[in-house]
Image (cartoon, rainbow, N blue to C red):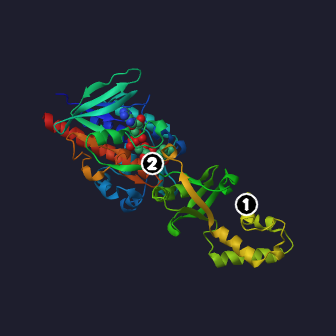
Amino acid sequence: MDRRIIVIGGGAAGLMAAGRAAQDGASVLLLEKMARPGRKLSITGNGRGNLTNTAPLPDFLRHFRAGSGFLRAAFGQFFSADLLALLDSIGVRAVVEEDGRVFPARGDAGDVADRLAGWARASGVTIQAGTRVTALRVEAGAIRGVEAVREGEDAARFYPAAAVILATGGASYPGTGSSGDGFRLAAAAGHTIVPPRPALVPLVTAGEVAPQLQGLSLRDARPALWIAGRKAAESGGDVLFTHYGLSGPAILRLSRDAVAALDARQPVEVRIDLFPALDDSALDARLLALLADHPRQQVHNLLGELLPERLIPVLLGLADIPPETAGGQLPAANRRRLRGLLKGLPFGVTGQRGFKEAIVTAGGVDTREIDPRTLGSRRVAGLYLAGEVLDIDADTGGFNLQAAFSTGWVAGRAAARAVREESG
Ligand SMILES: Cc1cc2nc3c(=O)[nH]c(=O)nc-3n(C[C@H](O)[C@H](O)[C@H](O)COP(=O)(O)OP(=O)(O)OC[C@H]3O[C@@H](n4cnc5c(N)ncnc54)[C@H](O)[C@@H]3O)c2cc1C
């Protein structure tokens, strides 16, 4: 019988799983459907690769929207410091930036992907790219191998294996190779799939305000998500206006809840606080002082002291204030309306940009069917699952990649041990 381990998918989780299993003495074949492994890893963090985060475990886990309890055991075996030590050993020095975000010092996620693939090969892994796995072969509740089609061929071939690690990623950014195959493969093998949804995804808004401001980025704004007329969540950081609506880290962080509400057909709104450091009365006092100090200057010019130029005509239009109004002539009602907009610029959310632009996929293989200590399937003996194919997802900040690396490492080690024990 074949003692080999097959890893499906050469992303962060798959490369780590394959390399780890090979280091533990297993014979490992990694099948990757794209022309080369690590496509998504290469574009993470705007090409700079936010690889992990230095937050201590309890804080780290708080950034997970699904899977935090499940991941505790994997993080207990291989966490951020272990990842950084491994990366250092293959020539990737890391630097820590704002909020504990860790990046490669060279600022090149593609280099990290290449070095990880190089490490896996040097550890003994055979990487066969251009090969798409189309089915898992399961007999009598145990994995026997996979069926896969090579680029340029029509027929699937059977690749026997003693263990299989499914690391096909989620369904987001399908151009990188992760197009949801893993959900179908796992479901066909008897796993429950928590319905996949785009998470960390830009939002589509109604009206002309966002398109008018297209390209403008607000630093340190505070957008709030309102669902069915109630404030559901708040977030801080940068907001980017686009031709379709809103993006930027502060919006992405709210998007998971926004998508769930949109799916439930609830009314969704984002209100952006442009002055989070000032409460209503402090902002009003600031506006009053500005107007009183320059009673003859046009409001449009006065607001230049407070706001980016491009926002001013848009806000004045929304507040029904003619731009040439003199500071001393601004009626109190219009000032209050302006203040309201500055503290909560409203955008009706009509949709989201879908898997094509989602940074991660929420949902996936139900983690209750997976042993958290080994990442082994409780449904199919010899099947292991790692990375985003599982129902785990987190905020931006390096948490998602660490989850992929940690689950990959644990699955690789456990699969190698199981195969060794069986043959021993
Ligand atoms: C634009 C963008 C930026 C991001 N930036 C960050 C960041 O800075 N920090 C962070 O922590 N996270 C980031 N993420 C999220 C992070 O990239 C993912 O969570 C992580 O890559 C998941 O790793 P994975 O190995 O599970 O899946 P993937 O990296 O998606 O790898 C899955 C692999 O499986 C292959 N595959 C799929 N189906 C098959 C099949 N049938 N047969 C063979 N192979 C198959 C795919 O081609 C792919 O190579 C970002 C995501 C995106 C889209």
* Residue 353 in picture, x, y percent from top left: 53, 48
* Residue 361 in picture, x, y percent from top left: 43, 48
- Disc 1 marks a residue whose amino acid type is Val
* Residue 69 in picture, x, y percent from top left: 31, 58
Residue at far left of view: 424
Residue labelled 2 has its Cβ within 8 Å of some atom of ligand 1 = yes
- Disc 2 marks a residue whose amino acid type is Val
- Which residue is drawn at the image coordinates 42% and 59% (left, top)? 63
Which structural element holds mark 1? Answer: helix
- Which residue is drawn at the image coordinates 40% and 44% (left, top)? 170
Left or right, residue 319 beside residue 30: right
What is the CA distance from the residue labelled 1 to the residue labelled 2? 33 Å
Q: How many marks?
A: 2
Q: Nearer the viewer, mark 1 or mark 2?
A: 1
Residue at far top of view: 153
Is residue 123 visible in the rendered structure shown here?
no
| Residue located beneath label 2 in the image | 360
The answer to which image quadrant residue 287 occupies is: bottom right
Q: Residues within 10 Å of mark 1 (few under 14, many from 20)?
A: some
> Closest to the observer: 144 or 227?
227
- Which residue is drawn at the image coordinates 83% and 76% (left, top)? 328
| Mark before the other along the chain sequence, 1 or 2 | 1
Which mark is on residue 349?
none
| Residue located beneath label 1 in the image | 314
Residue at far front of view: 265
**Quadrant location of the C terminus?**
top left
Is residue 176 depicted above or below 328 in this figure? above
**Quadrant location of the N terminus?**
top left
Give ligand 1's quarter of the image: top left
Q: Residues within 10 Å of mark 2 (few under 14, many from 20)?
A: many
Is residue 155 depicted above or below 279 in this figure? above
